[in-house]
């Protein structure tokens, strides 16, 4: 495998003293591994008492999540071996897959209903969350669309409206589940990709206002969403009703103080905080590792997202626009979900059923996030190959 001459922070020095760039982005890989391992430790800590009481053993969720990590690692390794051109050529088929999955999950008997939402398709020991796959598929489709219609997107309304039509249909299917959080992330991701594709700022502001109004309408038409909005404003007004989750999460943060109570010493995970190993695992982490530990996790996500967007920007510089837009799209998904989940945990946002990427319990989310990271690493590798091929050889330099 050819390595590239360069001077970035990811350089290493060989025996001949020549500086060579690593074939992968070390910062992106390092933050991903750190978040996955942190997630495994925190899921084990947060779920032991619930698993022992309800599933006959303290390591029930820990062992399942370990299996998910193995599957995610295998899927990521496969994805790193697939050329980016394959994802580009198959973009429309991924959109079709998203539509099929979001339709099938609504069929009674196929889609599994949990807590009033029909979001999962049973596949033996794993429940496939259709919305996670749909977000991944939409990014691949949008990356190809922006490359094919880039001039149209930058110069006419019709180029902007075209991708909004399949987006609206996917959002409709998500609302039918219902999965409001995934709808918000999907809308934000597509709008962000179109904007970075060169959409005029005036057009972007109009579309942003329109989607904002639609999102607000969707939030108020359902009574349970209105209750969440009210409880978000003051969770202590009804601490044993609609504000229960947020008030318990805030207690966890308060108990954590600066340095936390220590690994395994959380009290809120003892049947006080619902979904302690899934949606609210960040609250347990803050209780056991304090503000310092919580901020370290935020820094890990910040470094990961910055590296993803940097790789996307490098793709634009090299005129590899599909690679750039796909990296941007995955960056928006990971950043959006992390921001929303952490915002919910600290009480800055209304409660939403979104996992914390790479850290929360959940096979579908972990596997899809791992594949996203793997594709971005593949993009980084191919961009480095292209830069290497464009550089003159030593013989050409001497001539």
Image (spheres, rainbow, N blue to C red):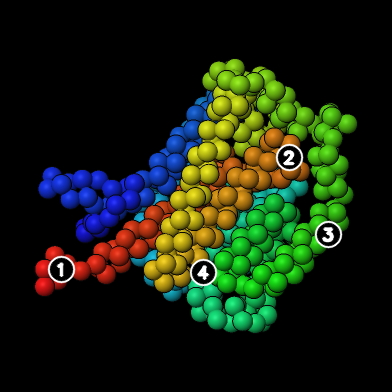
Classed neighbour count for the residue bearing mark 3: other residues with Cα under 10 Å, few (<14), some (14–19), many (≥20):
few
Q: Secondary structure at mark 3?
A: helix
Q: CA distance from mark 1 to mark 2?
A: 57 Å
Classed neighbour count for the residue bearing mark 2: other residues with Cα under 10 Å, few (<14), some (14–19), many (≥20):
some
Residue underneath mark 2 = 348
Classed neighbour count for the residue bearing mark 1: other residues with Cα under 10 Å, few (<14), some (14–19), many (≥20):
few
Residue 372 placed where, x, y %? 47, 55
N-terminal of the pair, mark 1 or mark 2, is 2
Q: CA distance from mark 4 to mark 3?
A: 29 Å
N-terminal of the pair, mark 2 or mark 3, is 3
Residue underneath mark 4 = 143
Residue underneath mark 1 = 397
Q: Secondary structure at mark 4?
A: helix
Residue 53 placed where, x, y %? 63, 23
Q: Secondary structure at mark 1?
A: helix
N-terminal of the pair, mark 1 or mark 4, is 4
Q: Is 78 displayed left or right of 310 in the figure?
A: left
Residue underneath mark 3 = 217
Whether residue 321 is visible: yes
Give the residue displayed 33% in from the left and 51% down from the top. 8
**Is residue 387 shown above or below 308?**
below
Q: CA distance from mark 4 to mark 2?
A: 32 Å
N-terminal of the pair, mark 4 or mark 3, is 4
Q: Secondary structure at mark 2?
A: loop
């Amino acid at each position: 495998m050819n390595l590239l001459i360069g001077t970035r922070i990811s350089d290493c020095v060989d025996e001949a003293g020549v500086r060579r760039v690593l074939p992968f982005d070390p910062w992106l890989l390092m933050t991903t591994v750190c978040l996955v391992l942190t997630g495994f430790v925190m899921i084990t800590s947060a779920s032991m008492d619930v698993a022992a009481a309800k599933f006959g053993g303290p390591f029930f969720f820990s062992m399942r999540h370990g299996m998910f990590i193995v599957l995610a690692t295998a899927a990521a390794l496969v994805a790193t071996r697939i050329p980016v051109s394959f994802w580009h050529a198959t973009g429309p088929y991924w959109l079709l897959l998203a539509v099929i999955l979001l339709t099938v999950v609504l069929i009674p008997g196929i889609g599994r209903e949990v807590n009033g939402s029909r979001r999962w398709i049973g596949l033996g020991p794993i429940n496939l969350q259709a919305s996670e796959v749909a977000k991944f598929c939409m990014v691949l489709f949008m990356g190809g669309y922006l490359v094919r219609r880039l001039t149209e997107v930058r110069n006419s309304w019709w180029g902007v409206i075209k991708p909004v039509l399949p987006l609206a249909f996917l959002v409709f299917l998500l609302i039918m589940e219902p999965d409001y959080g995934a709808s918000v992330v999907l809308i934000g991701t597509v709008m962000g990709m179109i904007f970075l594709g060169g959409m005029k700022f005036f057009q972007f502001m109009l579309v942003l206002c329109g989607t904002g109004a639609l999102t607000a309408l969707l939030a108020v038409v359902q009574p349970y969403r209105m209750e969440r909005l009210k409880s978000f404003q003051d969770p202590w007004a009804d601490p044993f009703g609609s504000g229960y989750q947020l008030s318990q999460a805030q207690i966890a943060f308060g108990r954590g103080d600066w340095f936390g109570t220590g690994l395994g010493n959380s009290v809120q995970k003892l049947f006080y905080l619902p979904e302690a190993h899934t949606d609210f695992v960040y609250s347990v982490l803050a209780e056991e590792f304090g503000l310092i530990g919580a901020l370290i996790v935020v820094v890990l996500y910040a470094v990961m997202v910055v590296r993803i967007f940097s790789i996307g920007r490098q793709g634009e510089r090299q005129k590899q626009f599909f690679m750039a837009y796909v990296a941007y799209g995955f960056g928006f998904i990971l950043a959006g979900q992390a921001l929303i989940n952490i915002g919910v945990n600290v009480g800055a946002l209304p409660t939403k059923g979104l996992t914390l990427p790479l850290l929360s319990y959940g096979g579908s989310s972990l596997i899809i996030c791992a594949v996203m990271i793997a594709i971005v690493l593949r993009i980084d590798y191919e961009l480095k190959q292209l830069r290497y091929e464009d550089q003159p050889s030593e013989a050409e330099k001497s001539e």
